[in-house]
Image: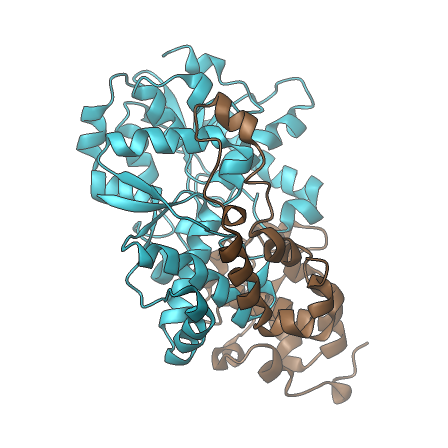
Chain colours: A cyan, B brown
Amino acid sequence: MEIGLFLGCNTPALRPDVERAIRTTMPRLGVDLVDLEGFVCCPAFGTFPSNDDDSHLAVSGWNLSLAEKKGLDLLVECGSCYSSLQTGREHILSSEKRKDRVNELLEPTGRSVTGKAKVRHITDVLYNEVGLDKISRTIGKSLEGLHAVVQYPCHTLFPSELVGFDSPPARPHILRDLVEALGAEVDSFSREYQCCGGAGGFHNTSAPEAQRYAKEKLDAIKNETKADLIVVSCITCLMHLDNVQKHLSGGNGAYGIPVFDYNQILALCMGENAREVASICSVPRDAVNARF
Amino acid sequence: MVDLQEAKKDLWSEVYDNPNLRYCFNCGACISGCPASNADPPLLIRNLARMVILGMEDELLDEDTPWTCVTCSRCEEMCPMDVKPFELCLAIRKWQCANDSTRIPPSIVEIYNRGYTQPVERNTEQRKELGLPEKLPVLGEYPDLLEKFRQMLMKTKIISDNEFMFKGA
């Protein structure tokens, strides 16, 4: 299948190794990625969606119409981008008045939004289009013997009627299944379904409280599991759970649990070089990378 | 002490025109599991819903807590009365921006100028090292598209009402 790649801004700007992992792994699973010329901010919830509907839906429509013009759906890894595009699409399509307004604003570009282009999270495509069997068959190396925990991206769960593809929404399993398909044992823990706390204004306005919130999760992982790594599938979860350990450890490595985006660990299982697909991190990944 | 005789009774229709808001019975499901309810000061959406319903205009205008929301939308899933608390949170932000331009996040000026808030087009060295194409097809690569993007935004209300903020672009 062919799909439009919506990278967002954090991945290409701050963690391009994740971009490399996505670009390398997806075509090998039969998902060909097409770049979108002139894509813009999703828009992030703290920007236009916090200002007015008119500018919010215009920017959503800008991105959706780029995919529609190419006759493609959109593939998104970042949870916030996914949720913003998905809910923006729904808001535009659920009212003729809003749809007409967006298309009036888009008119000078020669593009429009009719609803043809759908928005897909990368774990949805991996699970529902590629499938676990194909993933297991494609990898050359497995994670057998390693214990992992997973962090589900909240933006792909709630509100389930708009963004959801996992079930039941508050007890998801898709990311766990995807990691198990690589051969790792996925441990359960009490705070498995808790948000990472990294998005929006929480960490910016209340850094000590947001760090304490993440600490509860990391303590539960330390005390209740044998996790060698945390696997996420959202750039915010990745950066937050990785970077926050630096603050919490106070330099003494008290946590030291490496964090990987799913496509990074998938790329390593496919034999890719860690220097290209998993090199940018706060917590060293050497112990896991050494296995490959 | 808040004098409810002075309150603006129809504030809800200005802020959040969702009839389900009046069915909020203060259960607190929106707070349970909310990451930002751990912030200082805490985001307590239930209380914000009360302020809107009771018409506490001045207090609502001064509230910073809607801006600490992590946007996870768990509250929307949990609310038994379909108030859509996350939508309410965004609606309060929008109402604050419409009534006080100092609330408008500077990030929208950045997006108006370049299409993004992060330096997506600038880390060419790192991209090269990772074996990625050095250039992405970002908006700045297409001057005519960038111009159309700005013209589109200039027609939207929040931007045309606050044109001075975008003049330096």
In this rendering, does residue A242 appear at all? Answer: yes
Q: Is residue A94 left or right of residue B25?
A: left
Q: Residue at x 51, y 56 (%)?
A: B144
Instruction: Pick the residue in front: A238 or B116.
Output: B116
- Examine the rendering and report whether any part of residue A118 can be seen: no
Count of picture labels: 0
Residue B11 image-quadrant placement = bottom right
For the C terminus of chain A, the image quarter is top left
Please give the name of the residue rendered at 70% of the width and 86% of the height, measured from the top-left corner.
B8
Residue A185 locus on image (x, y percent): 32, 24
Pinpoint residue B126: horizontal percent, then vertical percent.
54, 26
Quadrant position of the N terminus of chain A in the picture: top left
Relative to A161, say whether A146 is above or below: above
Q: Position of residue A160 (x, y in %)?
A: 36, 58
Report which quarter residue A197 is drawn in. Answer: top right
Q: From this view, report whether residue A141 is shown above or below residue A121.
A: above
Relative to the observer, which residue lies in front, A204 or A216?
Answer: A204
Task: Return the residue found at the far top.
Answer: A290
Seen in the picture, residue A36 relative to A139 is either above or below; the reply is below
Asked if residue B127 lies left or right of residue A111, the reply is right
Residue farthest toward the front in the current orientation of the protein: B144
Horizontal side of A165 relative to A37 (left or right) equals: left
Of residues A267 and B112, which is closer to you in this image?
A: B112
Residue at 78% x, 78% y is: B2
Task: Give the x, y percent position of residue A115.
Answer: 31, 65
Which residue appears at 38% of the width and 11% of the height?
Answer: A291
Looking at this rendering, what residue extends furthest in the right direction?
A: B1
